[in-house]
Image (tube, coloured by chain):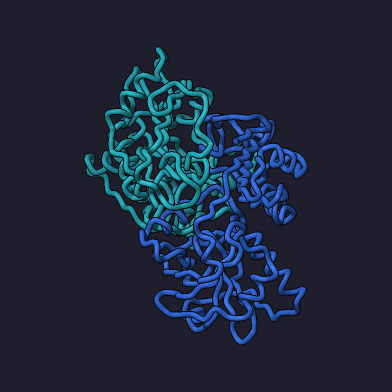
Chain colours: A cyan, B blue
Amino acid sequence: MILINGDVADGIPPLDRGVAYGDGLFETVTVINGKPALWDYHTDRLLAGCRRLGIHFTDRKILEAELQSSLDKSDKQLVKIIITRGGGPRGYKADYSIPPTRIIIRTDFPSSRSGFSHTGIRVRLCDTRLAVQPLLAGLKHLNRLEQILARNEWDDDNIQEGLMLDNDGRVIECISSNVFFVDDNTLITPAIDHCGVEGVQRRHIINTACRLKLPLSIRAIMLEEAMGFDEMFVTNSLIGIWPVKELMGKKLFIGSTTRKLQSLLYSP
Amino acid sequence: MILINGDVADGIPPLDRGVAYGDGLFETVTVINGKPALWDYHTDRLLAGCRRLGIHFTDRKILEAELQSSLDKSDKQLVKIIITRGGGPRGYKADYSIPPTRIIIRTDFPSSRSGFSHTGIRVRLCDTRLAVQPLLAGLKHLNRLEQILARNEWDDDNIQEGLMLDNDGRVIECISSNVFFVDDNTLITPAIDHCGVEGVQRRHIINTACRLKLPLSIRAIMLEEAMGFDEMFVTNSLIGIWPVKELMGKKLFIGSTTRKLQSLLYSP
């Protein structure tokens, strides 16, 4: 089911700035037994993104109501929420008299890949680099051509994710997920201040690590350093945590930190 | 009038990748007496963009036919063409079995600003920098959040354009137009290999300069150097050539090279 501004719809106005410029943000929310997982984190990020882009949208409640009205009876489903700056005249200048557009897209939960939580995945290195743009860093915005170029670099189902560096060679994230490493019992994850997406599962893991008093380091990581770590996992709202069993051909160990976090967090 | 894949439509499928990811390209074509100006240049750029993004679209003829069928009887009108990778399943991976989406949007020609061709415009410096991304440089793609942030930095109608630098401090372009400088009878324009859009009017001016044997330099330009030039203009398909009469508060001279190029090229 698709709702646009609360009404069942089958089309987005072609002059909407979401289409014209990617002028908006999105969230992909896993819903379990009618309850959207990590809802506060999703809406925190979405509203923070709206503030940073100057999109005047603040209403969490209407989003929750519309999400609920889009659901069917399935135990697990996926709801994508898109907020755009709305329709508008030609040109980049925002017209603040025009309200933002809310798009709610409910789909079935994809089930075929759930075994990776147990077995781990293989990760390659992408040639496509992330451009350094601090003004957009952290946001889950609708400008995703870099991810598309990166994901279309390979067509081998034996490799599940691609690691992305920024233009300066720093490890930032995987194409659709954030990355964590474990070294000497310390959890390490790249800082997302130059580029990349601040995932809600990443935030959840960081908060969980703090609660558990697990040593945690959020900082710049160069590829050479990352290759020296022997435990790694990727994470997003859809997959939960997937251990990495192989990075760029190097075998990795699925360790107790990864397994412990998997046992504590939601993992589909 | 709006056509989607040749049919009159009022909505874009919400699962289209143009909405989801800005996964596509666009052109804004000025049509005069039923003839699209610089049509070959527009379609060259659009098809080159499709090749670089891996969007399998090559059919200029269908675009021209659909553009023609969208027109009304106006002497001057504007047609925006959007090509997206099409609908598709969730996720960044392209599904090449799904055809691209063609969107044709005809609008009236905006008329209120035509005096600037004569009087010149004021240009400010944007705080928003363009991220360096050679894989997307030159393309008129649908990921335009940087331009939106830049254009919304000011709200003063006395300033018509904003100059954008890249992260390394090079002058690249204005928000909606390319820039040219004149120094010692040489036409100078920034190289568009790190970021920025290769405008069709820019290409037209470069070709015209070559035909006229006007000295021409396409290269990196730092802001300090640009501030030393005393003639400048901006250009795009909609405005033709607008002289710059003031850059960051510094008065500029509207010189003979600018006026000569204006007299030779289409200028609305």
Q: Quadrant of residue B154?
A: bottom left
Using residue A45 as the reference point, say whether residue A132 is left or right of it. right
Viewer-nearest residue: A118 or B197 = B197
Residue found at x 44% / y 21%: A8
Q: Position of residue B209 (x, y in %)?
A: 71, 74
Using residue A152 as the reference point, say whether residue A80 is left or right of it. left
Please identify the residue farthest to the top as the structure is shown.
A73
Viewer-nearest residue: A215 or A97 = A97
Q: Quadrant of the C terminus of chain A?
A: top left
Q: Quadrant of residue A255?
A: top left
Q: Is residue A221 visible?
A: no
Residue found at x 27% / y 29%: A61
Q: Position of residue A130 (x, y in %)?
A: 50, 54
Q: Is residue B215 above or below residue A11?
A: below
Q: Is residue B144 above or below residue B163?
A: above
Count of labels shown? 0
Viewer-nearest residue: B155 or A173 = B155
Q: Is residue A54 above or below residue B259?
A: above
Q: Position of residue B215 (x, y in %)?
A: 69, 81
Please identify the residue farthest to the bottom as the structure is shown.
B184
Viewer-nearest residue: A129 or A14 = A14
Q: Is residue B50 visible?
A: yes
Residue found at x 52% / y 38%: B19
Q: Position of residue A267 (x, y in %)?
A: 39, 28
